Image (cartoon, coloured by chain):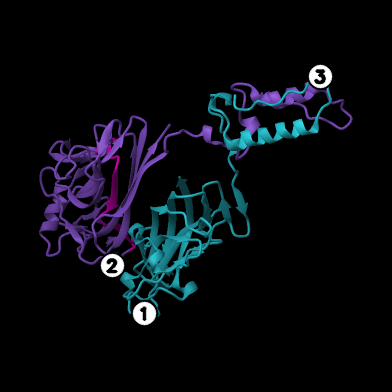
Amino acid sequence: MAYTPTPFVVGATLDAQTMRDNDDALRKYLHSGVAAADLDPLSWIDTRHVQPPKLLVKRDLQSGVTGMAGGRMYRPMERFTFATYTATGMGRQTDRDQWEEIPDTAMSLPLAGNATIIYHWHVTALVGPDTSDTGGSIPSRLRRIYIAPYFLRFDEELDESKVDKTALVEIRQNSGGYRPFVTTSPVDYRGGAAEPYHWSGYGQRSGVMVQSFTGQVNKPNIAHVGLAHWSLVQRSMLLNWSVSVEVYY
Amino acid sequence: MSRIDRERLEPGDTLTATDLNNRYNDYSQTGTIDADNTRDGAVDVPHIPSDATLINALHSSINGRDIYHGGYGIVTMTSAGAPTPVEAGRVSFGASGWTFSAVDILRVYGSLQCNAYIEDDPNNVTPNHDAMFTVPPTVGTTAVNISMGTHVWIVQLEWNITDPALATGWVPVPGGNNFQSQFVAGRYGSAVSTLQGCAMTQAYWSGAANWRPGGRADGGVNTIFKRSGWKNVPVTWSGFPGLATVYGLRLVVHGVYHPVNNASVNGLVLDYNFATWGASLTNPPEFYFSSGSLTAIQLRSV
């Protein structure tokens, strides 16, 4: 037993200094290492010891112990997360990849020291169709979005060098454009996308990034991991997404 | 209940030495400190195994190609016999490899940029491939043969636990089939139950338009197909390798397969007729692969 309090003697004055010494010793004991023999030998970490998830209603973002989930979750066609150059003004040219963050997918991790960070993500994207002439010189059939994780230290900003392209995934757009409303019998198109969304433009993708974090001198040991996108498509959105992180010292 | 769940002292209580001794001695009892004492977040070092939880982690691109599909690799269809897997990229764990104890877990995540290339309509072709169904004509006598659109390429994870040089000895990860035996008489393939470490990606999408009487002027149907284009295929596997040393991982590709039910067992078999039809074309269906990645994590489970 690593904790041995000073006993009080019956009939003697209860000394406040002794109480404080016992309290200090107990605090030190509980905070610096409980002796293994004093612990219940059974596994006891259960759901009471795990932080319950929180739901941020306005942002439709669920934040749990190891990750977050967002996009459309509760009501159809509401609160999508966008991955589009329409929103960022960046990325529609192919001569240089330009990356922007995907909102809410990032986490800042205060770390106690050198660590290995494993970042997981999953997205379900709806990309295009985009036959507009504002997509630079990219043929419609080649327009797509790229999604990749990025890793930043405390005082770094996102640029293409911080994106882990080895963990990149791509989702091509719906290759067809829009079909007009036609009532010529017997054909009765009601308009809309000309290609089936569930095929080429509807993409479920997932991935993993592993990063080694080395503690820095005179700077907070904060790592920042998240998802970035490079979009060559005017309209694309993430219907659902989730991210989670593992950290090992 | 923990002994430290003791009634609190209240104002007005008479405080004695025994009260205080009981309170402090709660913490000096062998084997009694548990969740009620340390509470939320107070997980301390003795709660955690002394061995490192994370033994090894590797994340790497696997074939050196760029993300813009430049200089892609090509896999052709198997037209007879057993498939010949074509490597799409690998990672090495070094000459010493990763040594696994009986309680170690290997988690693998792979991704491959690929394009199931197809140029010509696979409907109404000669010879008929296996995954077709025939529609009786509503006008005339010529039946319409519509592809079910279920042809797939397989991207499969293999490991090497025998050769540090990674020259020979590649085999599917546990639970995976090497596809070197016949699932249906005369056709090589695998049962679905032995497809661990495998990912399937469609060779194309096929269907029919105007699928209704009178939908087309002659009462027939229009067959349609769509090309998949470039996309990413994910491959994952996790399990206990057991007492083994793993020297490397790689992704291989082979095909084209279609689903089949044989003796009440679901599986995949090669479609030689599809490959024969493809070989007759100027631009036969092929599997293109560009860049990719493999992530491997070795964890200790206890």
The first of marks 3 and 1 along the sequence is 3
Image coordinates of residue B300 in percent, x first then y, are 39, 35
Q: From where the camera sits, is residue A182 visible?
A: no
Q: Residues within 10 Å of mark 2 (few under 14, many from 20)?
A: few
Magenta region: B191-215
Q: From mark 2 to mark 1, how far is it between C-alphas? A: 17 Å
- Tell me the amino acid under the disc marked 1: Gly
Circles 2 and 3, Cβ within 8 Å, touching? The answer is: no
Discs 2, 1 touching: Cβ within 8 Å: no
Is disc 3 in the same subunit as disc 1?
Answer: yes
Q: Please tell me whether mark 2 or mark 1 is closer to you in this view.
A: 2
Question: Is B261 inside the magenta-drawn segment?
Answer: no
Question: Between tags 3 and 1, which lies in front?
Answer: 3
A59 on left or right of A248: right
Q: Amino acid at mark 3?
A: Val
In the rendered image, the residue lying farthest to the right is: B12
Dot 3 alpha-carbon crowd within 10 angstroms: few under 14, some 14 to 19, many 20 or more? few
In this view, the mark in front (2 or 3): 3
Q: What is the display colour for chain B?
A: purple
Which residue lies at the image location 24% right of the left edge and 54% below the top edge?
B146
Q: Which residue is mark 1?
A: A136
Q: Which residue is mark 2?
A: B68
**Foreground: B174 or B230?**
B174
Task: Look at the image and say whether residue B194 sits in the magenta stretch.
Answer: yes
Q: Chain of mark 1?
A: A
The 10 Å Cα crowd at callout 1, few under 14, some 14 to 19, many 20 or more, is few
Give the x, y percent position of residue A133.
Answer: 38, 80
Q: Position of residue B286 (x, y in %)?
A: 18, 58
Circle 3 is placed at which residue position? A10
